[in-house]
Amino acid sequence: MNSIMNRLRGFMYGRYGFDQLGRFLFILAIVFWALSLFFRWTPLRRVYLVFWALNTLIYVYAVFRILSKNVSQRSLENDKYLRLRERVIPKWNRFKADNLDRDHVFKKCPYCGARLRLKRVRGRHTTKCPKCGTQFKVRIFFGK
């Protein structure tokens, strides 16, 4: 058993290995694989082939990244992914929090772009932005 592990360590020596982008790629490939299974027995056979091809390409690229000896280039790719993720995750968390709040609606001020939290009362209303002080009309479609 130790000889197999030593051979594996020797093979992976100097190679990039697994990182956050690799983890994301494997999860994405699993999602495409599941979607391809869903469409496999439907009349939409072409959709199955598209998802299967995407799944295969993502797996091949992920394995290529893991076995690559160009560590600096793979590290730059991972840094770009992490910067993009840091921009997307706060927006996603805000979106989830906004949808959980059933008593308020969130609107942007058309002049300064400030985010306003307003009571969810259906109809047209005039509101004042606390940041820039301008008054503007807001229409709330769903409410009490």
Image (cartoon, rainbow, N blue to C red):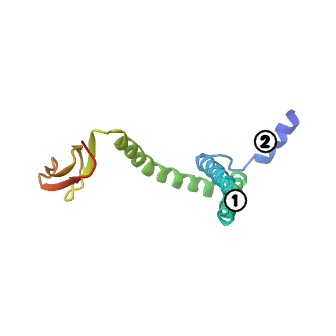
Q: Position of residue 14 (x, y in %)?
A: 72, 49
Left or right position of 76 against 60: left
Q: Amino acid at mark 1?
A: Trp
**In front of the other: 53 or 59:** 53
Give the residue pinned by disc 1.
52
Left or right position of 130 against 62: left
Q: Position of residue 133 (x, y in %)?
A: 11, 51
First in sequence: mark 2 or mark 1? 2
Give the residue pinned by disc 2.
9
> Could you classify mark 1 by the number of other residues whose Cα lies within 10 Å: few (under 14), some (14-19), or many (20 or more)?
many
State the SS at label 2. Answer: helix
**In front of the other: 48 or 68:** 48
> Could you classify mark 2 by the number of other residues whose Cα lies within 10 Å: few (under 14), some (14-19), or many (20 or more)?
few
**In front of the other: 104 or 28:** 104
Q: Amino acid at mark 2?
A: Arg
Above or below — where is 3 with respect to 143? above
The quarter of the picture where residue 64 lies is bottom right
Left or right position of 23 against 102: right
